[in-house]
Image: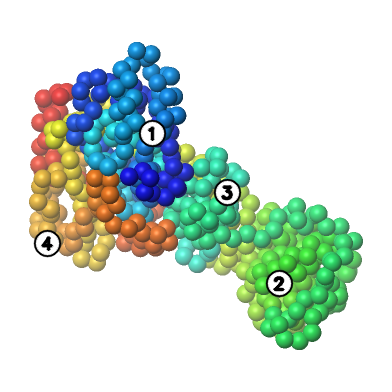
Amino acid sequence: MAEQVDGEGRAAARPLLTDLYQATMALGYWRAGRAREAAEFELFFRHCPFGGSFALAAGLRDCVRFLRAFQLQDADVHFLASVLPPDTDPGFFEHLRALDCSEVTVRALPEGSLAFPGVPLLQVSGPLLLVQLLETPLLCLVSYASLVATNAARLRLIAGPEKKLLEMGLRRAQGPDGGLTASTYSYLGGFDSSSNTLAGQLRGVPVAGTLAHSFVTSFSGSEVPPNPMLAPATSEGPTVDLTVSVKLWLERVCTHLELEVQEPHPGERAAFVAYALAFPRAFQGLLDSYSVLRSGLPNFLAVALALAELGYRPVGVRLDSGDLLQQAKEIRGIFRTVAAQFQVPWLESVPIAVSNNIDEKELARLAQEGSEVNIIGIGTSVVTCPQQPSMGCVYKLVSVGGQPRMKLTEDPEKQTLPGSKAAFRLLASDGSLLLDLLQLAEEPPPQAGQELKVWPPGAQEPCTVRPAQVEPLLRLCLQQGQLCEPLPSLAESRAFAQKSLSHLNPAYKQLQSPAVYQVVRSEKLQALVNSLSARGPL
């Protein structure tokens, strides 16, 4: 089975990307003759991240690729032999060599689903030894992906639907794998594009980017382009020396702005000309290398207007320092006066992009009504998730040999829900979410319009609910190692996430002190919990 899958499975994670105690437990199961007992684990989280009331499920595609490629290589087995007791039975290592996921079944929340505490993101069933070994890599693949997707969704909620969000945090990410994961799942969570070209190549994330201050400051103004000639956008008509045209336009722009023609930095202008010659259809000016209003803006306008004479339109300007909101307002005002002066109405709507360590607070300021900012680049605050660097997902055993298992602990919060379960989302007639229901898999599914008795966690008495609609949450993803249906594309999962969020009551989407979304239990599940709690450890 492992040979029939794409090579990206091993790129997602290797079998030994795990904790040593998974291997020591595997040996213990094998010695006890329990390696092939049927078992089921659930992967879930106990609290929504960032103090919020929702999360987005992510990482499923990576999990599927990993599982379908799972197989220990000789080098993996040799390493385990070097760290396990030297008298370990060689038969154990032969068992490891033969392992793959052809007997593993996975049910999961579809990628991009709204997820709430206690509801399984994954249900993994198969031989006990094997599904135990899968714990750490599955947690690794799901936890960070879901954390970043949720963080991105929060940032999208702050920005609103109109602002474009660019993820640009690769250089701030926790290593190459973290960078690729962040770029992938920030897109799923609602960002429009990423600066990460590998995310574009491997995951289909739209990529975007133009130039940095190093490009601008590398020019002194004495450089002579080897070929300054530029043809019209229509390819009809004579070529024009862009440097000459820019010089003429600079004089007109400076006169209008009441600047001396010597004030705009010549090196900055040379950099803009060089970039415009390379990208006449995608010219963007980075305005703050020297002075935004006295250098960057007039130099940009001179190049933009020279390009416009040839039928090209700039794609925007970018600011990376100072009061971004105020500068954007001033720049938009100048765009309007210059547009009127030179009769170029398109200039009024040239996009203004900003970046500079933007967090939730600054994003809210930039997204306020009346803001002239169009595109917002966010790096550190999306990829490092500074408010909460870990999702806190767990992977817990719920049944062995068809018998429920429950973790009883000194901390009631860490108790687990026993047995193989089904999960349903109960909705109102308008499609808004009421609550999620966990019940035993053997129970009949709830019916729309039917009154149900359910138990909120910690409640002393059940409550009743009558859903207008009922949606099963967990879909069969892998059955005996075989993919049950094609996985949606990343773009499809992104659209699904945004649609799901649109159905969530605004009270649950508040970033500060949100309402708490209820995840309840069926009467039969609650009765099993009570029974096992009273009986003590199994």
Q: Which residue is mark 1?
A: 72
Q: Amino acid at mark 1?
A: Leu
Q: Nearer the viewer, residue 422 or 263?
A: 422
Q: Is residue 311 above or below residue 352?
A: below
Specify which label sits upstream in the sequence, 4 or 3. Answer: 3
Q: Which residue is mark 3?
A: 169
Q: Name the mark on residue 280.
A: 2
Gap in angstroms between the C-alphas marked 2 and 3: 27 Å
Q: Which residue is mark 4?
A: 449
- Note whether residue 480 is visible: yes
x%, y% of residue 216? 77, 57
Specify which label sits upstream in the sequence, 2 or 4. Answer: 2
Label 2 or label 4, whichever lies nearer to me, is 2
Q: Are marks 2 and 3 in contact (CB under 8 Å)?
A: no
Gap in angstroms between the C-alphas marked 1 and 2: 52 Å
x%, y% of residue 217? 80, 54
Gap in angstroms between the C-alphas marked 1 and 3: 33 Å
Specify which label sits upstream in the sequence, 1 or 4. Answer: 1
